[in-house]
Amino acid sequence: MRANTGDELLMHGRVVGQHDRTAKIVEVLGTRGEPPYRVRFDDGHEAVVSPGPDSVVQEPHAQQQR
């Protein structure tokens, strides 16, 4: 997985009833775009995450085309 600052991280719910979550990548801490990432959720909460296989990186313009 590779990402750039400004990309969106979509984390799919892993159990029944858990909703998907999206966060904006505000800092790439790994080398060459690899995890971990510092992300900011819609509520303003920030966290450092190392996303698993249930996550997808989306470029910002891909989000706007929906």
Image (spheres, rainbow, N blue to C red):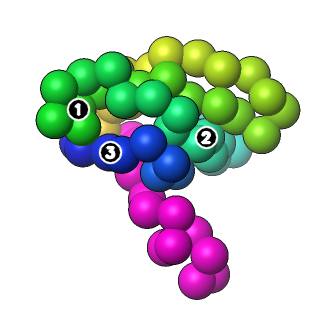
Q: Which range is magenta? A: 54-66
Q: Which quadrant of the rendered structure holds the C terminus? A: bottom right
Q: Residue at x 70, y 34 (%)?
A: 41
- In the rendered structure, does residue 61 fall within the stretch colored magenta? yes
Q: Is residue 1 left or right of residue 19?
A: left
> Label 3 to label 2, Cα distance in Å?
12 Å
Task: Residue type at mark 1: give it.
Answer: Glu
- Please rate how many residues cluster around mark 1, counting C-alpha atoms within 10 Å: few if below 14, some from 14 to 19, many from 20: some
- Please rate how many residues cluster around mark 2, counting C-alpha atoms within 10 Å: few if below 14, some from 14 to 19, many from 20: many
Res 18 visible: no
Task: Residue type at mark 3: give it.
Answer: Ala
Q: Residue at x 16, y 35 (%)?
A: 32
Q: Return the disc, 3 or 2, that comes first in the chain's sequence.
A: 3
> Label 2 to label 1, Cα distance in Å?
16 Å
Q: Is residue 15 left or right of residue 49?
A: right
- Please rate how many residues cluster around mark 3, counting C-alpha atoms within 10 Å: few if below 14, some from 14 to 19, many from 20: many
Q: Is residue 62 left or right of residue 53?
A: right
Per the image, label 2 sits on a secondary structure element best described as strand
Q: Position of residue 10 (x, y in %)?
A: 52, 48
**Mark 2, residue position:** 23
> Label 3 to label 1, Cα distance in Å?
7 Å
Closest to the observer, 10 or 37: 37
Q: Position of residue 7 (x, y in %)?
A: 47, 51
In this picture, is 1 found above or below 58? above
Q: Which mark is residue 34?
A: 1
Q: Which mark is residue 11?
A: none
Q: Residue at x 33, y 20 (%)?
A: 29
**Mark 3, residue position:** 3
Q: Return the disc, 3 or 1, that comes first in the chain's sequence.
A: 3
